[in-house]
Image (spheres, rainbow, N blue to C red):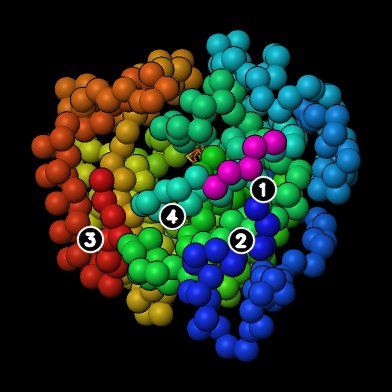
Amino acid sequence: MPGCGTLLGPSWPQFHPIKGLTYLKTACYSLFPTPAPPIATPHPMPSWLLDIQTIYHQPEVLDYQRGREILDTFPRAERIVVDSHWKIPGLNGFEGNLENWNKIKRNVLVLGVKSSLYAQPNSRSSDFIAPSHANGCAMACTYCYVSRQKGFANPITTFVNIEAIMGYLRRHAARQGWKAQPSQVDPKYWVYDLGCNSDCSVDALISDNVRDLITLFRNLPNAKASFATKFVNRDLLDYDPQRKTRIRLSLMPQRIAKAVDVRTSPMAERIRSINDFYAAGYEVHLNFSPVIYYDGWQDDYRQLFDELADVLRPEAKTQLGAEVIFLTHNEKLHQINLGWHPKGEELLWKPELQETKYSQMGGRNMRYKRGFKAGLIDEFSALLKERLPECPIRYAF
Ligand code: SF4
């Protein structure tokens, strides 16, 4: 693994605008200081969402401070030692656990050590997808792709080797140098998505991984963290991100969220939180994802945009940006959802309006037909511009 010395590669001259630096290897320690060791704090636990009774963990989890902290947070939970955090017998393999889908999300936690650390290049919501500090989720959105990747039992898995994950990110960011060109992702910083496989606001109820990552990005001169969320966790208001973390609040009309955003924070609470998160030092963008087509969707979105326009303070409005992602569904997920939540499928599964796209994994994904979707994107964009003109769309698809 290349270390800080890689700063001296081709991108190194881009660092010159920083005043007062002594170049050569010592510079990277000035640019990318190691954060102070994390302090464990008690986490208030909304019991409707999380009531951890069973913890599966790899034996080596006990070798890590973060692992011991988490086990201490849930002293009454039964501990089951497993060889791997992945494909746990009796847990993963959804069929047998269908009836317990949400119970498992609420009562089970998996602790593991992440072995492969890799920042995947990305182009829409971020420049890179950071190596996961967690995967899985205690919430239960019926369109969620994370569950498809986890053998259809999808409790939170938290990775306890957070120091290694942060060290990797520190070195990776150092290798990038300064961003040469502004992009729709961000005009200035390289943006790393921390929450592609989990919801960071819920992960922060389990451990200080998210706090540590936000602290790390606060101190990286050329990089910013970002994550989408559907849960309002006010603990994050104390993390002092200094505008180096972008929260992307995920929004849709409440009456649709009731059917598909299972176990998430109500829309009005998410909207109200934007002012507070902005005041606490976050950048806050809007993540309209997924946008679901149904008769009358325009009226509901008009109402949603008007609520945003009414509630947001001027300073929170002017820093907004939006990403708009129309629904992609999946045939296997559809079959499973029919077993526990058929109501949501009436909205998600519309073969007459959708076309098939096979994923790289061979799964059959369903997206709105191309021409139809182009019209929906145009309509959505015009509506947002009309009702909330302060909010530019970063990308829509
Ligand atoms: S909040 Fe995100 S990660 Fe959690 S279930 Fe919903 S879509 Fe999946």
Residue 117 visible in the current orientation = yes
**Real-space Cα distance between discs 3 and 1?**
45 Å
Some atom of ligand 1 lies within 8 Å of the CB belonging to the residue at label 4 = no
Q: Is residue 149 above or below residue 158?
A: above
Q: Which residue is mark 2?
A: 6
Q: Which residue is mark 3?
A: 384
Q: Nearer the viewer, mark 3 or mark 2?
A: 2
**Real-space Cα distance between discs 3 and 2?**
44 Å
Q: Does the magenta run of residues contain 143?
A: no
Q: Main secondary structure of the magenta part?
A: loop
Q: Residues within 10 Å of mark 1 (few under 14, many from 20)?
A: few
Q: Which residue is mark 1?
A: 1
Which mark is first along the chain, 2 or 3? 2
Which mark is first along the chain, 2 or 1? 1
The residue range painted magenta reads 115-119
Which mark is first along the chain, 1 or 3? 1
Percent x, y of residue 121:
45, 48
Some atom of ligand 1 lies within 8 Å of the CB belonging to the residue at label 1 = no
Contact, mark 3 vs mark 1 (Cβ under 8 Å): no
Which mark is first along the chain, 1 or 4? 1
Q: Which residue is mark 4?
A: 126
